[in-house]
């Protein structure tokens, strides 16, 4: 599905990157819920009907139907706007303050089928697949135009399949190729900001790894007392989880990111789209019983056990939005 | 053709049979209207008279041009009476072939001749069936030495020489759990100092004393009453005595069998598990009789959906008689698999809740041996979230702690019947089946019971009835 272009589209694109099944669609669906659960005014609205429809559909599936959204099978573009709390006006320039203006971070997000990113291998002499080439070009165009990237790293998939590097390396190389002549690539680094999201923090294997490495912290303001891994420690957890990659190539993901992106433009987030299970009676995180994913029966969809409490789903977006808007020339205030 | 002739013939045949020893043969030749019938009678190794017969038509005896022998030789050859005692019977003296054959036989053997009008076959059969025993019949028993406790293979007399059929005799025996065939009631005769197996029939008998009446039906056939029906036992003497233990197994004490059955999952599997529990209880009831108490616990899967109430473990019977437990089991069998309350956890079951229910009810000071027999497939829920990704028990029961507690109870034993073969079963089943872990599809009841210490192992089984002359 492709959304109708909106007349007042924000200028920033945030592309989502990750292997198939790494949780891109789930993350998008969790975004609305995460914003709703925050005690602030941040909200997300669709910038066009298709994006609104997508938001409604996926959010309902996640929170009401408690069924995981279908993984995306077609290239889909969505355009949303994150609207924040109104900022106080700058009184220095006017005696009569103008109405508060809430910050708006435009997000143009592409949800692409995971396999499309890694479908770049072509044997010499083989006939190019026109449709795939078209999609790949469209995707690369979007990556070139984007300055923010959400890269999803699914540690469970990496443990079982080990293809994270495979799905990073090909598009990264092509992106660099496309931007080789650009002024933005003059210093040998891509200009993008990249939020590396280590997903499935709710899985016992990920949480236990973080616990054993003493990387867990708690937010005293969190009413549920969920454990968290700060962004400062997330990189170490990422490195630790790479150790158990099925292919043994996960360490190259980290190296590739460092080689192609400015170190200060990479930030790690340990995320969970569905979050931890919270017993409705106790309303707090329980170390004995936190698994929110019901094990699947044969031939049946995954089911979510309790309420969805996304963890670190909004933060990467806000960080990217803030970093991207921070790079814009500041508008001259009107007198 | 008078009644006295018939009696004389009967007496002559009986006398001839009585005189048979070793390899001697008695030949009875009947000359009838249509041909010649020969009865050849001998005694087998047990002294039982055995007869066989063959008939040849007159037409085959008198028309043999191709062989070049005359009719006389043909008749003598068909009679085959060259050795042993011969009796000639003519049941059709007016016939020319019978008359001529009678002359030839009298010339050849100087045999006593009888003329009767009754079927000789019936007469011979009656004589053989009414033959008094030429050898004594003994029942094979085992006799425990009151001092050393050693078991001695012995016999007790049933019928002495000369006993007539339809004679009865009583014998008191004691039966212990038998071997694969149960307890064998073997009758032997004696060849010098060596017993010779006459007959053997077996049955699985509940342990205890039995007042048995043996009846000599006819030579070679003894029946026993006062016992469940005995079945033919195909074993020979060597095989029968091969499994005789040197000592009596320790006496079985009271036992408390707790059958815990997983009643969630596929209908067919649940039915099969309940059926296996049924078999085990029935079998042990036969082995231990009143010494057995049975508890029955049914457990399923936890529900983790707030809309479906978690179904607790069901104690269908506790320390009940085997019959009461089987009644409770039938109720479970009629109900079938628990399907109400979807969604249940698909990969684990309330094993930990079952263990808690058992531990809570068990008397740690109980005198009976306690055996927990778990029949199922799924692993328990962990006490807390772990890498198995199986959701933790809602009651936080810790199966490892509970099982450890039960394992430390004196006399506790653990057996399991798992849907999977041992090598494919979840590791917890190796603890649940610490003493014996059987596969649902290949259950050896005797091995399971012996492995759990509820019955004597096959090597220690007493294959014959016991006789204690001090009692």
Image: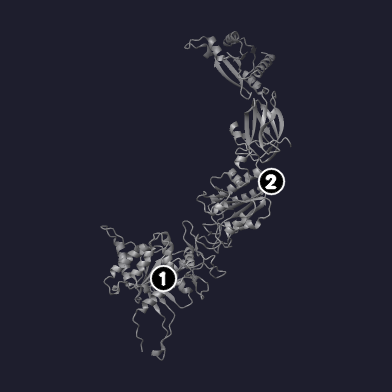
- Using residue A262 as the reference point, say whether residue A61 is left or right of it: right
Tags 2 and 1 both on a single chain = no
Q: Residue furthest bottom?
A: A95
Q: Nearer the viewer, residue A26 or A212?
A: A212
Mark 2, secondary structure of its residue: helix
Q: Spatial distance from mark 2 to mark 1, Cα to Cα?
A: 70 Å
Q: Nearer the viewer, mark 2 or mark 1?
A: 1
Picture quadrant of residue B301: bottom right
Residue in the image at 67% along x and 29% along y = B138
Q: Which residue was labeled with disc 1?
A: A268
Q: Position of residue A156 (x, y in %)?
A: 44, 62
**Residue B469 visible to an observer of this rendering:** yes
Label 2 sits on residue: B290
Compared to residue B173, the image places residue A239 above or below, namely below
Residue B50: which quarter of the image? top right
Q: In the rendered image, which quarter contains the N terminus of chain A?
A: bottom left
| Residue A152 location (% of width, % of height) | 40, 67
Chain identifier of the residue bearing label 2 in the image: B
Are there few (<14), some (14-19), or many (20+) residues within 10 Å of tag 2?
A: few
- Per the image, label 1 sits on a secondary structure element best described as strand
Q: Position of residue A73 (x, y in %)?
A: 38, 63
Residue A37 is labelled as none
Q: Is residue A27 visible?
A: no
Q: Is residue B31 left or right of residue A149?
A: right
Q: Is A143 drawn above or below residue B215 in the view shown?
A: below
Task: Give the class, few, some or many, for how many residues have Cα within 10 Å of label 1's Cα (few <14, many ≥20).
Answer: many
In the image, B129 versus B435, the foreground residue is B435
Relative height, residue B137 to residue A151 (above, below):
above
């Amino acid at each position: 599905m492709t959304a109708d272009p909106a007349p007042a589209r924000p200028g920033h694109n945030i592309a989502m990157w990750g292997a198939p099944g790494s949780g891109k669609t789930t993350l998008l669906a969790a975004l609305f819920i995460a914003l709703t659960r925050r005690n602030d005014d941040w909200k997300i609205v669709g910038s066009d009907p298709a994006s609104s429809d997508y938001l409604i559909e996926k959010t309902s599936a996640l929170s009401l139907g408690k069924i995981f959204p279908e993984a995306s099978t077609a290239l889909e573009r969505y355009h949303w706007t994150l609207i924040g709390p109104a900022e106080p006006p700058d009184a220095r320039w006017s005696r009569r303050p103008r109405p508060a203006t809430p910050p708006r971070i435009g997000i143009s997000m592409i949800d692409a089928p995971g396999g499309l990113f890694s479908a770049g291998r072509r044997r010499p002499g083989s006939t190019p697949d026109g449709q795939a080439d078209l999609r790949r070009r469209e995707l690369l165009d979007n990556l070139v135009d984007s300055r923010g990237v959400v890269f999803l790293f699914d540690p469970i998939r990496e443990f079982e399949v080990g293809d994270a590097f495979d799905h990073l390396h090909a598009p990264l190389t092509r992106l660099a190729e496309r931007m080789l002549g650009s002024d933005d690539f003059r210093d040998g680094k891509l200009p993008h900001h990249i939020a590396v999201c280590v997903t499935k923090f709710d899985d016992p294997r990920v949480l236990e790894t973080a616990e054993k490495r003493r990387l867990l912290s708690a937010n005293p303001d969190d009413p549920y007392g969920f454990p968290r891994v700060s962004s400062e420690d997330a990189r170490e957890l990422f490195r630790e989880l790479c150790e158990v990659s099925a292919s043994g190539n996960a360490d190259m993901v980290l190296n590739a990111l460092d080689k192609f992106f400015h170190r200060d433009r990479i930030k790690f987030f340990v995320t969970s789209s569905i979050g931890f299970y919270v017993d409705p009676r106790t309303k707090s995180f329980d170390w004995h019983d936190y698994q929110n994913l019901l094990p699947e029966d044969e031939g049946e969809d995954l089911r979510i056990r309790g309420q969805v409490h996304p963890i670190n789903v909004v933060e990467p977006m806000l960080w990217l939005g803030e970093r991207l808007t921070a790079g814009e020339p500041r508008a001259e205030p009107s007198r | 053709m008078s009644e006295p002739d018939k009696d004389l013939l009967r007496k002559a045949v009986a006398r001839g049979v009585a005189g048979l020893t070793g390899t001697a043969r008695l030949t009875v030749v009947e000359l009838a209207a249509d041909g010649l019938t020969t009865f050849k009678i001998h005694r087998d190794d047990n002294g039982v008279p055995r007869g066989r017969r063959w008939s040849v038509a007159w037409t085959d005896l008198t028309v043999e041009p191709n062989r070049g022998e005359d009719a006389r030789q043909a008749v003598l050859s068909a009679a085959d009476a060259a050795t042993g005692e011969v009796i000639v019977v003519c049941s059709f003296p007016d016939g020319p072939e019978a008359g001529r054959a009678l002359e030839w036989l009298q010339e050849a053997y100087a045999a006593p001749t009888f003329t009767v009008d009754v079927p000789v076959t019936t007469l011979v059969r009656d004589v053989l069936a009414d033959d008094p025993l030429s050898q004594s019949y003994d029942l094979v028993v085992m006799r425990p030495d009151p001092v050393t406790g050693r078991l001695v293979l012995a016999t007790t007399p049933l019928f002495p020489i000369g006993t007539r059929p339809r004679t009865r005799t009583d014998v008191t025996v004691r039966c212990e759990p038998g071997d694969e065939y149960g307890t064998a009631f073997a009758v032997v005769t004696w060849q010098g100092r060596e017993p010779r197996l006459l007959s053997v029939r077996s049955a699985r008998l509940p342990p205890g004393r039995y007042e048995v009446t043996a009846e000599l039906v006819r030579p070679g056939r003894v029946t026993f009453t006062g016992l469940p029906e005995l079945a033919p036992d195909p074993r020979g003497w060597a095989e029968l005595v091969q499994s005789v233990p040197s000592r009596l197994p320790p006496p079985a004490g009271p036992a408390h069998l707790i059958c815990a059955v997983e009643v969630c999952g596929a209908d067919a599997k649940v039915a099969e598990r309940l059926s296996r529990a049924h078999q085990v209880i029935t079998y042990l009831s036969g082995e231990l009789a009143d010494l057995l108490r049975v508890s029955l616990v049914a457990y399923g899967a936890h529900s983790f959906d707030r809309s479906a109430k978690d179904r607790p473990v069901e104690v269908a019977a506790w320390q009940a008689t085997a019959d009461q437990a089987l009644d409770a089991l039938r109720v479970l069998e009629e109900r079938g698999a628990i399907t109400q309350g979807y969604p249940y956890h698909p990969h684990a079951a309330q094993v930990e809740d079952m263990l808690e229910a058992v531990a809570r009810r068990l008397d740690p000071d109980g005198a009976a041996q306690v055996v927990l027999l778990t029949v199922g497939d799924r692993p328990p829920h962990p006490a807390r979230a772990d890498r198995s990704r199986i959701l933790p028990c809602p009651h936080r029961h810790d199966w490892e702690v509970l099982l450890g507690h039960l394992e430390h109870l004196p006399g506790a034993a653990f057996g399991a019947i798992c849907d999977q073969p041992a090598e494919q079963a979840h590791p917890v089943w190796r603890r649940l089946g610490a003493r014996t872990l059987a596969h649902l599809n290949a259950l050896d009841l005797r091995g399971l019971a012996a492995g759990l210490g509820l019955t004597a192992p096959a090597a220690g089984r007493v294959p014959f009835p016991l006789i204690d002359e001090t009692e």
